[in-house]
């Protein structure tokens, strides 16, 4: 599933070519029948919040997109490519186009619907001025493992499985530690690191979370197998201590940790 950094990158890229312009909207394969409602209208702006995108055509005309596990965008310049496969939606002008393939939810929201969604979501580390204290207060009251709480979009919006694993490793916190046992200073550190890592992830197309001093190859370009500390590295040695990385299931997703660096 795309994480918050990718959603914000999509919003920036799409706004760069479509914001404040009249656009064509269609659904050649019938995956989004309401496309005709938006066709020919001016797209005012695009918002990214957590893992949600909002394309604002008017106060009560907001295209809401959630990519889910397998949704993705493709982008290019005119001419339009042939309509194939799981094509759900296209937005285009005389010069540029985007295609949405897959996606869990593609629907038209009114202003009240969009505001209700925002109220359900926790603070987003990638939105300037987001206040993390409500998230800290929720975590401090919960016996739920911190690894599950970081993936709960009503607690913090935008963190997915990769950043969950890597942020907790960098904080030296076991993913099964109850939320109430993670002190306020540690939570502030998690928030700062989320802002830093996810912000870098908006600019880059790679999820690089390792520090140069910890990588086996300390100079030169970052190798693909040295980009992350624990995510999908189960059975391999920790870059810092050499202990084998572990994995387990938590709330339907896989968690990763180093049993020495992240003692429970």
Image (tube, grey):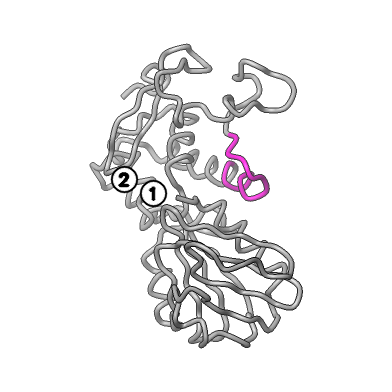
Q: Secondary structure at mark 2?
A: helix
Do labels 1 and 2 touch, CB within 8 Å? yes
Q: Nearer the viewer, residue 170 or 23?
A: 23
- Against 222, residue 88 (above or below) is below
* Mark 1 surroundings within 10 Å by alpha-carbon count, few (fewer than 14), some (14 through 19), many (20 or more): many
Q: What percent of the width, then of the height, locates residue 251?
A: 27, 43
Kindly identify the residue that appears in the image at 59 percent across and 19 percent down. 214
* Range of residues picked out in magenta: 197-208
Q: Which residue is mark 1?
A: 136
Q: Nearer the viewer, residue 233 or 243?
A: 233
Quadrant of the rendered structure where residue 9 is? bottom right
- Against 19, residue 7 (above or below) is above
Q: Which residue is mark 2?
A: 140
User: Taking 142 as reference, is 204 left or right?
Assistant: right
Quadrant of the rendered structure where residue 78 is? bottom right
Q: Is residue 206 magenta?
A: yes
Kindly identify the residue that appears in the image at 64 percent across and 26 percent down. 223
Q: What percent of the width, then of the height, locates residue 171?
A: 47, 31
Q: What percent of the width, then of the height, locates residue 68?
A: 41, 57
User: Taking 40 as reference, is 182 left or right?
Assistant: left
Kindly identify the residue that appears in the image at 67 percent across and 48 percent down. 203
User: Taking 161 as reference, is 227 left or right?
Assistant: right
Q: Secondary structure at mark 1?
A: helix
User: Taking 182 as reference, is 71 left or right?
Assistant: right
- Against 158, residue 170 (above or below) is above
Quarter of the image that includes the C terminus: top left
């Amino acid at each position: 599933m795309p994480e918050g950094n990718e959603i914000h990158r999509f919003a920036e890229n799409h706004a760069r070519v479509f914001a404040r312009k009249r656009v064509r909207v269609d659904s050649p394969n019938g995956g989004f029948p309401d496309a005709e409602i938006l066709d020919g209208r001016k797209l005012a702006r695009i918002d990214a919040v957590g893992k949600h995108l909002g394309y604002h055509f008017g106060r009560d005309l907001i295209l809401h997109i959630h990519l889910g596990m397998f949704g993705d965008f493709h982008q290019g310049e005119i001419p339009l490519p042939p309509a194939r496969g799981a094509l759900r939606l296209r937005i285009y002008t005389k010069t540029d186009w985007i295609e949405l393939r897959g996606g869990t939810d593609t629907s038209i929201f009114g202003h009240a619907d969009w505001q209700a969604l925002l109220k359900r979501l926790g603070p987003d580390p990638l939105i300037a001025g987001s206040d993390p204290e409500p998230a800290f207060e929720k975590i401090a009251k919960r016996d739920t493992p911190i690894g599950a709480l970081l993936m709960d979009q009503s607690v913090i919006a935008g963190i997915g499985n990769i950043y969950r694993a890597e942020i907790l490793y960098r904080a030296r916190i076991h993913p099964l530690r109850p939320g109430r046992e993670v002190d306020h200073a540690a939570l502030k550190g998690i928030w700062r690191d989320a802002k830093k890592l996810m912000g870098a992830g908006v600019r880059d197309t790679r999820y690089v979370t390792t520090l140069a001093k910890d990588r086996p190859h300390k100079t030169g370009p970052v190798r693909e197998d040295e980009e992350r500390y624990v995510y999908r590295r189960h059975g391999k040695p920790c870059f810092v201590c050499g202990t084998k990385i572990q994995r387990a299931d938590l709330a339907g997703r896989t968690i990763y940790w180093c049993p020495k660096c992240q003692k429970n």
